Amino acid sequence: MQPGETADLFEDDRLDTKRAAAFDPNLVYDLCAGEGGAWQQNRSAAVLCLDVPKIMVREDAAQHLIVLHASYAAAASAARAQGTLLASINAVDAKAKQFDDGLVAALDVACFRGLGGRMTGRVDLVRRLLEAVGPASGAAPHLAAALSLAGEEAEPADAAGKRRLLAGFKKNELWSKPAGFYTRSDELGRVYRFTRFLQRDIAADDFPGGVDLAAALARDADLRAAYQRTIAFDAGLRNPATCGSLLDLGGVVPRVAVLPPPSSREVELFGRIFPVGLPAGADLVAELVRRVRSGEVDLAPRSAGGWLDRQVFALETLLLPERATERDKLVLTGGYKERMLEAFKSLIVTRLDKAYFMPLSLFGAVPKPRTVPPTLRVEPCATFALRTARAYAFLEAFLVAAMGEDALRSLCRLREPGLRARATVGGTATRLGCVLRVTLGRRKPPPKPPARDVHERDEDLLAELRRMRDLFYGLHIVSAEDVGMRPWIAADEPVDCARCKALSLEWLGNWTEDPDLAVDRRVAVPVYADRRETRIWATIGVRLTQLFVDWASMPKIRSADGSSPWEVLPEWSPGVCYLVPTDEFAEISRGPGRALAREDLRRVCDRKGTRAAIIEALRE
């Protein structure tokens, strides 16, 4: 960060700068804190204060806040004896992360193999391109090498050229070494290497066999249409490409690739500001944060942006809380803003791998409560949750249009190996939040058996995608209620608010038991590479953070039957301390061309234990 920016970024909010919300007598908060449950609570004009302390008074009493855990389930288990646990933005995102990884893995495999008449398999597409140009074409070694990486052999006239391409690709592990969920199975590894090889951009006027490829696509309308669908699908599922495709050969686009890689704001930024290498002491994440806060980098989805743009946009208010719709309902201390910054850092990595009201007693009214604690059901995240729900809604519409509902119902998301989870009631698959039965050893062999199986959920991809969308709509509703606001879901959004809220409350009631949160959270993503070093962003563990919630201005209460007027309690209510599990972010510098697979990262984390020791070991 630039000098002076830290002070501004972590400056405490002042209540007098907040726009006072109008009191809404009809906005009853359905979590009553009164004795016997006989009093309603109204938060419409109240303001919450959120704080994360920076200094522990007794270090020996804060050991549980220092320990790094591999998963949210492990952190939640450690928290049970220490205090009241609250679902954090990070934990909510961890749920989404597991679904997202499984969804993209399933889609990538489907695209790799092909999906009936809806989508030509990418291996088949490359094979057809090779047949169209012939083995003597200058494009043949490039296409044949890609097929070899997919597990198929094709010999071009220039066999030595194919071998050179493969040797050069395999030597560059930043390109050729499977990362993220692509390490889950041998087939996903092949998908990764095949795709990455074809994502290499080459000068358009120097693309091997470019004239042959352009001619083949021009004369074969069916081949051209299949290729166009592939490029359009990638742009929607991820983001628009950073370079041109084979359709741009002979045009004005300077560089093209067979499968153009998707763009991302952070990679675009780093390539622009550090075109010849990193200066000494460069802090990439600080550069990104500074430019987002200054407005130089706008995270709003571009008109042609895909799902990735919308996912990153959901993170904007972690850096710019003044842009959140709930901004005037929250007073954030500098410590909490720092916590939001750390959440942004870790979540940006993952985007790159009730209460029943008892009736009044017949023997008279229950005494008025003396205090009303500022309870929460989830860390305030209304804008984040709504934007995430809308990102899933976009993805659903895109996938249905591109693949069809039947194709999506034929797929299941792919999970981490080892466990297979089914949400059941009486043996029938049902929605999130019911009892989870975890079974071991059930494996579904794919059509082309890999050395290791990939485990699938019983629920089909379309149903689970819609459930994730509705979960985040529900989290938006619950979070808005917690801060005393009405949800701001648009009138034209087809959302069943009651069902979505119930879904999210079910999940929040059992989130620590969700198998998706038992998955190891530690991941690494390379974000910059030059001839001297490789910069990697990583989450190196989950730790517990204290979150203090207090009233900046008090809510009002009235009797449960509504017979008394709304009034503010005479006594100030004490605050509440929650434990929220959070990711530990680290930016790591490694040698030139040095990748960092998930398994390698996790081995170092398990062996070293502490943040400093982990970072030092990873620099080797």
Image (spheres, grey):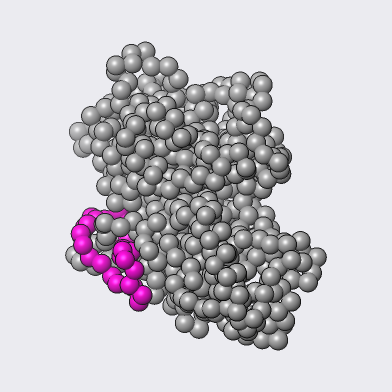
On the rendered structure, is 16 left or right of 396? right
Q: Magenta region, mostly helix, strand or loop?
A: loop
Residue lying farthest to the top in this orientation: 57
* Above or below, 423 relative to 521: below
Residue at left 26%, top 41%? 359
Q: Is residue 380 visible?
A: no
Q: Can you tell which quarter of the image residue 259 is in?
A: bottom right
Residue at left 42%, top 26%? 612
Where does residue 554 sit, x and y in percent of width and height?
46, 25
Where does residue 42 sit, x and y in percent of width and height?
44, 35
Where does residue 95 sit, x and y in percent of width and height?
39, 50
Residue at left 67%, top 74%? 138
* Above or below, 67 relative to 306: above
Q: Can you tell which quarter of the image residue 1 is in?
A: top right
Boundaries of the magenta span: 430-455
- Is 323 magenta? The answer is no
Residue lying farthest to the front in this orientation: 160
Q: Can you tell which quarter of the image residue 61 is in?
A: top left
